Image: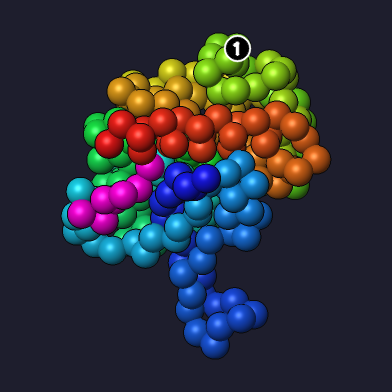
Amino acid sequence: MVRPRIAILARFAENTSATRYAAVITARRLAEGVWAAGGEPLTFLPVAGSNWAERLDGIDGVLMPGGADINPSTYGQSISSEHVYDVDDLADETDISLVKYALEKGIPVLAICRGLQITNVALGGSLVQHMDIPHQHHVAPVTIDKYVDELGLSSATVEASCYHHQMIDQVGAGVEVIGRSAEGFVEAVKFDSPAWAFGVQWHPEDNYDTNRPQAELFERFVAESAAFGKKN
């Protein structure tokens, strides 16, 4: 079987145990979740002014991963919370340009945590800079109200493993809320695109190997990416 090639935009790290200096990284669990679902995870370096038509040649799907906070200037605000951390304008610029290109060209997209937030911002939405009660190390049920079958889920309720202190505030154009937490916070969305394109606020990679719906989400994304690759 030829595995569909999944582009994962790297995140910047000041240092890691395996490198002497700053690093570009992909979370191991995330890459393993894509691999377990049948995909080939490929890490892409964030580069300003990227020509995505060239860089994504041969790519079947785009995964927008979790990461650090987004600069509030991208949604017309200044930093108003001391909890905003590790802002990187290059990362924001590259994320926004990539997800806009993928959605416009109909490349399947799965956006996770920061990936969901930056996609909402790219489409004109905004964020809560710091939640009153952050969902860090937070595991709780999330109810999916629509598109359960399209997400490949066997259940409309998923046990979501969250690690975030920001969340969607104003919803961007073409962003449809399809799932919320018990508190009413946005946890899952569908993006307007010719292709399969969804975002989740939680981290399905955390428990994909012990919680079947998380694996199902990766499997559907990889399957949609494979179908896209066969047509292109």
- Main secondary structure of the magenta stretch: loop
**In the rendered view, would you say 57 is above or below 118?**
below
Residue 203: image location, x then y, percent: 63, 42
Residue 136 visible here: no
Which quadrant of the view contains residue 74?
top left
Residue 202: image location, x then y, percent: 63, 38
Q: Nearer the viewer, residue 171 or 190?
A: 190
| Left or right side of 164 for 123 | left
Mark 1 belongs to which amino acid? Asp
Residue 105: image location, x then y, percent: 24, 34
- The magenta region covers 54-60
Residue found farthest to the front: 1
Pointer 1 residue: 145
Residue found farthest to the bottom: 20
Q: Nearer the viewer, residue 146 or 52?
A: 52
Q: Nearer the viewer, residue 173 or 218?
A: 218
| Left or right side of 91 for 127 | right
Residue in the image at 47% along x and 47% along y = 2
Which quadrant of the view contains residue 120?
top left
Q: Secondary structure at mark 1?
A: loop
Residue 219: image location, x then y, percent: 59, 34
Residue found farthest to the right: 210
Residue in the image at 45% along x and 53% along y = 8
Residue in the image at 80% along x and 40% along y = 210
Quadrant where the C terminus sits is top left
Residue 211 visible here: yes
Residue in the image at 41% along x and 31% along y = 227
Q: How many marks?
A: 1
| Left or right side of 202 for 140 | right
Q: Is residue 95 part of the magenta span, yes or no?
A: no
